[in-house]
Amino acid sequence: MAKERAPRATKPEMYARYRQIVERFVYQPEPYWDTIEWIEQEWGLGQASAQNYYTESKKILKELQNETYIDSLTEAQGFWRQLMKDSFLDGDKETAITARKELSKLAGHYIERQHVDLTANIKFEFDDE
């Protein structure tokens, strides 16, 4: 006999499932197929549906991580901008310039100079024939 088909989930149920899966990714990391099996058993789904839930939940997790990164970057930029402004107004140009460099690094426009030592000992040998 064929497996009885689970009733179609409503939108709120789907979002609740995504949330559960994302929480599982974060708090109970496990191999792909173990997660798929858990999804299948938890909601009585087939493998294809479980894989779709898994894929969509991974997308949601990536979006959340990107938002967290952007929030963190925005906060850091705000700090360095304020420090640069305050330092410049106080006449501390050295700190203002350092703050500007840090802002440029965060934006990806500034690369620290690196000194590379290219000295080598070369020994020449000639055959005296």
Image (cartoon, grey):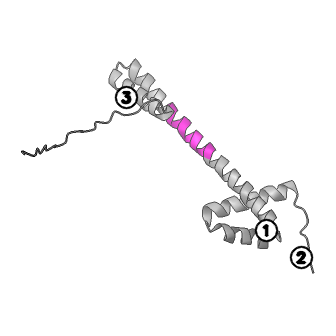
Q: Which residue is mark 1?
A: 47
Q: Residue at x 55, y 35 (%)?
A: 74
Distance Cα–Cα, label 3 vs label 1: 55 Å
Report the amino acid beneath label 1. Gln
Residue found at the very far left of the displayed protein: 128
Picture quadrant of residue 89: top left
Which secondary structure is most common in the magenta stretch? helix
Whole-percent x, y for residue 94 in the image: 33, 24
Task: Judge from the rendering whether residue 23 lies leftward or rightward of residue 53; answer left or right.
Answer: left
Query: Considering depth in this image, is 2 or 88 the residue closer to the camera?
Result: 2
Whole-percent x, y for residue 75 in the image: 53, 36
Magenta includes 92? Answer: no
Q: What label sits on residue 3 in the rendered view?
A: 2
Task: Judge from the rendering whether residue 74 lies leftward or rightward of residue 52; answer left or right.
Answer: left
Distance Cα–Cα, label 3 vs label 2: 66 Å
Picture quadrant of residue 126: top left
Q: Earlier in the sequence, mark 1 or mark 2?
A: 2
Report the amino acid beneath label 2. Lys
Query: Considering depth in this image, is 67 or 110 the residue closer to the camera?
Result: 110
Q: Residue at x 37, y 34 (%)?
A: 112
Q: What label sits on residue 98 in the rendered view?
A: 3
Q: Earlier in the sequence, mark 3 or mark 1?
A: 1
